[in-house]
Image (cartoon, grey):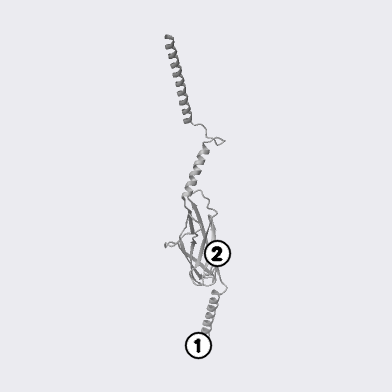
Amino acid sequence: MQKVTKKWIKFSICCLLLFVAAIHTIENTHVYAANKEVSIILPLRQVVTTETTKNVEDFSFDYCLEALSENAPLPDGKDGSTYTFSLTGNMEKNIGVIRYENVGVYKYSLYQIHMDDLKNFTYDTKVYTLTVYIKWDRDGDLIAEIIGDNGSGEKPEKLEFVNTYKKTVIDDTTDDKNDGKKSNEQYSDGDGKQPDTGDVTRTKDYIACILISAIVILVLYKSRKREKQNLT
C-alpha cells in the first residue's frame, strides 16, 4: 500500500511539473507573437527668421533622416538607408510613420541638407542622434522608447531647426532707398510736390528786405541829387 501511495505521489508531482512547463511555454509563445508591431512618429519644427523685411515664408529647406543601425525601418518613401523631406516657412511636421516588428535598439541621425541655391541664409547645423528602444511590456505588446541627443550631450525637449536670413549690402541699399522715398512721401502734398518750409519762407523774407532797402537807398540818393541840382 505504501509503495502504491509513493508511486501516486511521484506521478502527481510529474504531472504538476509538466502542467507548469506547458503553461510557461504557452505564455512565451503569446508574448513573442510574430504579428505584433508598434509605430512611432517624430514631430519636427522649423523656424525661419529674418533680419530684414523680406518675406521668408515661401522658402523651403530639405532634411534627411538616416538609419545608422542595420535593418532600422524608415517611413514610406525611403531611399536605401535615408528618408528625405522638405519643410516650407515656419511650420511643424510629423516624420513617420515608422513601424517596428522586432525588439531591438535602432539608431538614426536627423540633420538639415544645406542648399547652395539659397544664399544669405544661415543654416542650423545641429545633428540629432535618435535612439529607439523596442521591447515587450507585461501585456505582451511591443512598446517604443525614444531618446534624443542634439549633439551636445543634452536631451532635447523637441526637434527644432532655426534658419536665419542675413541682411546684405543690397538689402541695406534697398532699405535706404525705401526710407528716403517714404521720407519724401511723408513731407509731400497730394501731387508729390514739396511744400514750402519755414527755411524757404525766411529766405524769401530776406530777399524782400534787401530789395526794399535797395529801393529806399536809390530813392534817397536821387532825392539828394535833385536837392544839389536845385541849389546850384
* Residue nearest the observer in this picture, 153 or 198: 198
Q: Where does the image place residue 123, in percent across and percent down from the top left?
A: 47, 57
What is the crowding at mark 2: few (fewer than 14 residues within 10 Å), some, or many (at least 20)? some
Q: Which residue is mark 2?
A: 96
Residue 95: image location, x then y, percent: 54, 63
Between label 1 and label 2, give the one nearer the viewer: 2
* Residue 113 in picture, x, y percent from top left: 49, 62
Query: Which residue does the image show at 54% across and 62% down from the upper left?
Result: 85
Furthest residue in direction top, as rendered = 231
Nearer-N-terminus badge (1/2): 1
Which residue is outermost to the front?
232
Rendered view: 42 above or below 214: below
Amino acid type of the residue tagged 1 in the rendering? Lys
Q: CA distance from mark 1 to mark 2?
A: 64 Å
| Rendered view: 215 above or below 175 | above
Q: Amino acid at mark 2?
A: Gly
Residue 65: percent from the left, percent from the top? 51, 65
Residue plotted at (51% across, 86% down): 10
For disc 1, the neighbor class at 10 Å (few under 14, some 14 to 19, many from 20) is few
Q: Nearer the viewer, residue 159 or 222?
A: 222
Where is the C terminus found, in terms of image quarters? top left
Above-or-below relation of 54 to 201: below
Callout 1 touching callout 2 (CB < 8 Å): no
| Residue at the spot 43% in from the left edge and 11% down from the top edge | 229
Q: Which mark is residue 181?
A: none
Q: Mark number for residue 6?
A: 1
Q: Which element type, helix, strand or loop, lies under badge 2? A: strand
